[in-house]
Amino acid sequence: MKMLTTCILLCAFFAAGPAHAAKPSLSFGPVEESGVVQIRSRDTRQQLYVTFTSEGGEVDITRDVAYSVHPEGVLRIDETGLVTPIADGDAVIKATRNDQSCEVKVNVTGFTTPLPINFGNKVVPVFSKLGCNGGGCHGKSGGQNGFQLSLLGFYPEDDYEFLRKESRGRRIFPAAPERSLLLTKATGMAPHGGGKRMGTDSYEYRTLVSWIEQGMPFGAPDAPHVTAIQCYPKARVMTQSTNQQISVIATYSDGTTEDVTRMALYEPNDTEMAECSETGLVTTLELAGEVAIMARYQGQVSTFRATIPLGADTSEMPEPVNLVDNAVFGKLKLLGIPPSKVADDATFLRRVSLDVTGTLPSDAKVREFLASTDPAKRDKLIDELVDSSEYADHFSNKWNFILRNKKSKGEDTAGTHLFHQWVWDSIYENKPYDRFVREIITASGEPLVNPAVNWYREVDQVEEQVEDTAQLFLGIRIQCARCHHHPFEKWSQNDYYSLAAFYNRVGKKAIPGVAAGFRDRQIFHNEGVATAKNPRSGAALKPAGLGSAPLDIPAEADPRVQLADWMSDPKNPFFAKSLVNRYWKHFFNRGIVEPEDDMRETNPPSNPELLDGLADRFIASGFDLKDLVRTICRSKTYQLSSLPNEYNASDKQNFSRYYPRRLSAEALYDGFHMVTMTSENFSGMPVGTRAIQLADTSTGPYFLKVFGMPQGDTACECERSQDANLAQSLHLLNSKEVQDKISKNEARAAKLAAETTRPHTERMTELYQVVFARNPRPDELEVATSYIERHKDNPRIAYEDILWALINTKEFLFNH
């Protein structure tokens, strides 16, 4: 079916349209506004691509055309569309396919009078392209075998000094450049642990030889440097197993541009959907969806996005009810991926109860909801759950761990519980999210008086405060920029330490009466001008939000207030999007950007319209978290079945169905006790406390640890493991805890077996309702009652066995 769909799409692309349609045509790209491709140096190459445009769309045919150049002698173009100059002058390149053709003018200058090779602009990219300055080779700390380069070439001045002066410049031989150790090792003529990296006929080799021949210049201090790169085309709709040549154009600080396609590095964000060659040729694979190809050059990044339709019929799409559906269903129509059907009432009831409150619905609630004929019952259920105390239990549990709230050796139990209660109150009262964050990062005073101060207890170093703030509240993993320029983003060390300057005036002092060694400290603003020192350059940096101008903050003012103002500004490009993406993943087990706290240009959202729409609504609502939860849960997208159809089984990013996931450790433990009608007493906690209400992980039993309860060591939600393993299966199957609670005299199995006023079918229906939130199917009921009949002399054994079996099913262990 997939092959047929692909054939149909390809035919649509290449078939002539109706008489009124635009005539199919060929065109070159990328071309400057003047319509002339400029090649300004003998060391410059230009990657062109040829596009066939028809009624069906745009298709890359760069490798399917015949090229000619007139006049000859100015440049050459190979079958991949790569143009190289051979003399100064003007020429026209013509591409021909069947009876169609297109032309582009090319102007070549600087060939006979080449400019000196700039080390940072020409030589460092060679090291990056060959992998020499990667973290696994000479770019790692300490280098490799005595040869060290800066990681990914972010500090060319260091690389230059090391090449020229280390060991008296033994790697460079100016008298005979080709005999330089730098070249003989890389070409395999001398032993090299990294193997052969280039040939003697390669562009990279010629560049290094020319640089040595020219006297190894570094370049003028004010020489232009790369300020941005851009992929062309920026996006394309493609079919499975097709190609698209992309070009990467670098813009320099003086406004000039240069093609760097063959020197850029490429990486797809989903290797199951597409791959990209070293020359910038993107090849789609068999999956439908959207994939981004990251291009990286000289610390700058850009992306090419490929949309790959499946092409199936989407005419029976559910009717959208809000902005979520408009964005998701619109994307599914574009991709030709029909969504699953809307889930039935029983599935929805169990799903939304677990997602919003972390608890299973009672058997009474199941019967009431399934019997109701109210068309608005789903919306009313969502409102009921969001306004419940269980909602606050569930989401305060989520925030408690990523805010790293935990006690240390029991010495600060009071502060741990107070901070958890503060978070609970904020969630239950629906405190606006911007105020919630502001009260945390600007907190001052003592932990027992202002519980939000407890955040600074575990996050007590400036570096931790910067990195947790960026990751938790902005969705940015900025840790790399502490030591060097971020390899996959635009953030530099200056950006990192400018953000750190907001926290450099945070003061800490002992609390009178608190014994030495305790972590509790009083937090206060230590007056003074806020700056942070870049340890590499020594520059004193003023506070600045990421991508924002530095701020002049008076010495008496707390810089953290300015940080909170910048974060909560509706124009902030990170704050709202980070939160809605985090909550989206909570409900769908996958973020619109995945991972949910790694939002960057090179990791684009799978549905930008959805992310922008949710963020805009979140801001317009006054950062209302409950409104966000309602918006997501009321959508038809959230209410889709988890059962795939014949088209969307492999869809992992477009939300064409609900993605099942294992219950969290706390929800599973509480659910186990609910269905068995037993309980667990936690050390130091009131009787009746549920696992999801625990403020501290140290009081949790082995069950919670084996099922992946986080320990609150990081701000990353990845600390919570939902992976299945053998220890979990063995614990549920035959642990003493599970067996003892199922077989307790006061437990559900014993009580159901002891009832004589109701038939077994009715009692078994109740059991299914409490375990699965649905009624049993006739075949399930028949099997269960038959098993009980075989144990009529001791029906309690049968009920215990059946309950044990139901607890060990995937239907119970997963939210689906």
Image (cartoon, grey):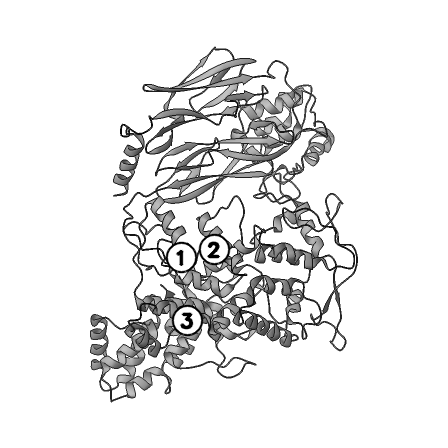
Residue 530, quarter of picture:
bottom right
- Of mark 2 and mark 3, the one earlier in the sequence is 2
The label nearer to you, 2 versus 3, is: 2
Mark 2 and mark 1 in contact? Answer it, CB < 8 Å: no
Q: Quadrant of the C terminus?
A: bottom left
- Viewer-proximal residue, 518 or 614? 614
**Residue under numbered circle 3:** 731
The label nearer to you, 3 versus 1, is: 1
**Residue under numbered circle 1:** 322
Residue plotted at (52% across, 29% down): 262
**Residue under numbered circle 2:** 614
User: How would you rate the neighbour count of disc 1 (Cα within 10 Å): few for under 14, some for 14-19, many for 20 or more?
Assistant: some
Element type where label 2 sits in the image = helix
Specify the label residue 432 is tagged with.
none
Residue 759, quarter of picture:
bottom left
- Viewer-proximal residue, 422 or 420? 422
The label nearer to you, 2 versus 1, is: 1
Q: Is residue 711 visible?
A: no
Q: What's the residue type where badge 3 is placed?
A: His
